[in-house]
Image (spheres, rainbow, N blue to C red):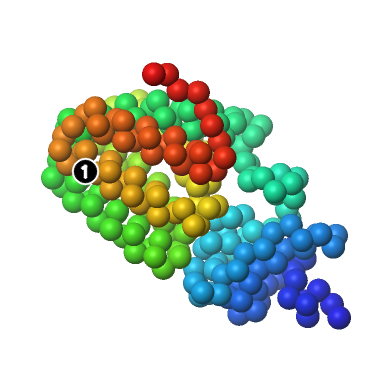
Amino acid sequence: MGDHDQGHALAGQLLDHRQHLVDQLRVERRGDLVAQQHLGRHGQGAGDGHAKALGLVSVQAGKGVFVQEPTRAEVAGAFAWPFAAQVSAADTFQLRFALEGFACGLAAGVMTAEVLDILEDNVEQMRRELRAGDFEQANRLDFEFHQRILAASGNQAMFALVTSGAEIFLESQKLPFIRPERAQETWQEHRKILKALARHAAGPAQKAMQQHIRSAALRTGIAFITLG
């Protein structure tokens, strides 16, 4: 009986959505099981997004869904950080802690009702996507939430820095979603940030953002040094 018949998929193999992404995704390499995600309860669309967010599959337009070749880190049971040659994940979170925390404090002082409405809609939509198990959409909303706050701070230098390294920052925001059982924590932390922004409370807003970024890193198993 071949690998396909047993419900296993080899790296590089074209997947059948119904069997491999709705029932379960198993990725095998040289006979070793390196990843397994049970996605049946979330349905096909959520399965695609979840598997993509975890780096288990790639979706190629007009071709289909293919199993990704596992990296050494994935085989060892750790998360994959594709920018290791440029900057570590820990350094990225540490930069975000300092930069986004300060930007959030600035934004609180100049926050408009229009931007608050947009952020409120974002937080509510994230809640719905998380309940539906669509982690790809939740990740997109997470990135937009942080970008909106950076833009609202009025500091163009900080906003330009994040925009120029958008791929790295976006990747760091994907990492906490590898723990789907704790994904709701992201939404709860965003609500806390939003409440501080709505009160125009700079100190609490900065603290809430910093706590959020630190907690997001810890959900991924990453710790970094902070002052104070």
* Quadrant of the rendered image containing residue 215: top left
Residue 153 visible, this orientation: no
Image coords of residue 185 (percent x, y): 40, 50
- Left or right? Give the position of 210 relative to 105: right
| Residue at which label 1 appears | 195
The amino acid type found where label 1 is placed reads: Lys
Tell me which residue sits at (62%, 41%) in the image: 81
Q: Residues within 10 Å of mark 1 (few under 14, many from 20)?
A: some
Quadrant the C terminus occupies: top left
Q: How many marks?
A: 1
Toward the viewer: 216 or 12?
216
Residue 30 visible, this orientation: yes
Quadrant the N terminus occupies: bottom right
* Quadrant of the rendered image containing residue 137: bottom left
Image coords of residue 44 (percent x, y): 53, 74
* Quadrant of the rendered image containing residue 11: bottom right
Tell me which residue sits at (38%, 35%) in the image: 211
- Left or right? Give the position of 21 relative to 168: right
For numbered disc 1, what is the local secondary structure?
helix
Image coords of residue 227 (percent x, y): 42, 19
Tell me which residue sits at (47%, 44%) in the image: 173
Tell me which residue sits at (45%, 64%) in the image: 134
Q: In the figure, 197 relative to 9: above or below? A: above
Toward the viewer: 119 or 213?
213
Toward the viewer: 151 or 7?
7
Q: In the figure, 190 relative to 222: above or below? A: below
Q: Residue furthest top?
A: 228
